Image: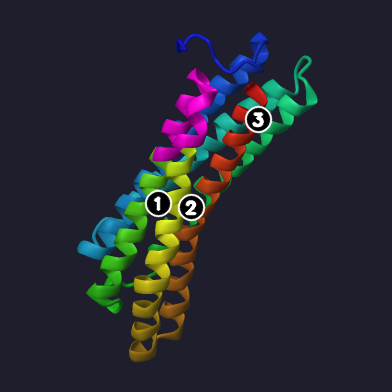
Amino acid sequence: MPSEKPLAWLGKRKEKRALNLSKKHLKKIVKTVELMKKTVHLFCENGEYIREKAEEVLDSERKADEIKDEILEELSKGSFAPLNREKIIRLIMTADDIADNARAAALKLTFLDPGSVNQELKESVKKLADFSYESTRLLKKSFSASLEDPSVVRKETGKVEKMEEKVDTFRAETLIPKLVKWADESHRPGTSILITEVENNIEDVVDRTEDCADVLREIAIGAK
């Protein structure tokens, strides 16, 4: 199906504009997660310029919020079918949670001393950040596919779901055991709590990405 023919349920100009803005919103969110990933890498590799990179994450998240507000303003104008409005709102608010968690992870890293965390644990956290970025890239690809051909959305969003399952396995079998071992040996309760929260925020990036994929599947089903 040609790219100029978006989802069938987006028949009105305002609905098309809202979803085009949603695409812009998602692009900025992927950028936010990419910057978070780079912040994690800096923390794990040399610990320099973490604050500067975290500020870039915050700036990107703020810009995503501005686009979100623009979408909500667009949805408040004119007449939208209630179901269409609800789906778009669910999509952008769930995607907004992705950026919020990326921002939180990056900001918390600025309060940690990189030298207080062993390299083995750092490598696992870095890998988790890589997974989170890849999951958002897969979501963005799924979104673009949904605009062109709803029939391929199940296949594309399935890749996001598989990534979420991969992350669950990695955390259970690799990251969590290393985190527990390090926490027991380091005797740094404050640092242990904060690094656990960072890990949870990054995991939530993946979880919310999978939730967005679920919304896309609903949209695609409605478009058939």
Check contact, mark 2 vs mark 1: CB within 8 A: yes
Q: Which residues are magenta?
A: 138-156
Q: Amino acid at mark 3?
A: Ile
**Pointer 1: what residue?**
132
Check contact, mark 1 vs mark 3: CB within 8 A: no
**Pointer 2: what residue?**
205
**How is the protein colored in the picture?**
rainbow
In which quarter of the view is residue 82 placed?
top right
Vertical side of 214 occupied by 113: above or below: below
Vertical side of 64 occupied by 132: above or below: below
The crowding category of the residue bearing disc 3, from other C-alpha atoms within 10 Å (few below 14, some 14 to 19, many at least 20), is: many
Measured Cα–Cα span from mark 3 to mark 2: 19 Å
Which element is circle 3 on? helix
* Foreground of the two, 215 or 187: 215
Q: Which is nearer the N-term, disc 1 or disc 3?
A: 3
Q: Amino acid at mark 2?
A: Val
Check contact, mark 3 vs mark 2: CB within 8 A: no
* Foreground of the two, 103 or 132: 132
Measured Cα–Cα span from mark 2 to mark 1: 6 Å
Q: Position of residue 71 (x, y in %)?
A: 63, 26
Q: Position of residue 66 (x, y in %)?
A: 56, 32
Q: Which is nearer the N-term, disc 3 or disc 2?
A: 3
Using the image, tell me which numbered label, if any, was put on residue 88: 3
Q: Position of residue 109 (x, y in %)?
A: 39, 64
Quadrant including the C terminus: top right
Q: At 46% from the left edge and 36% from the top edge, which residue is drawn? A: 155
Which element is circle 2 on? helix
Measured Cα–Cα span from mark 1 to mark 3: 23 Å
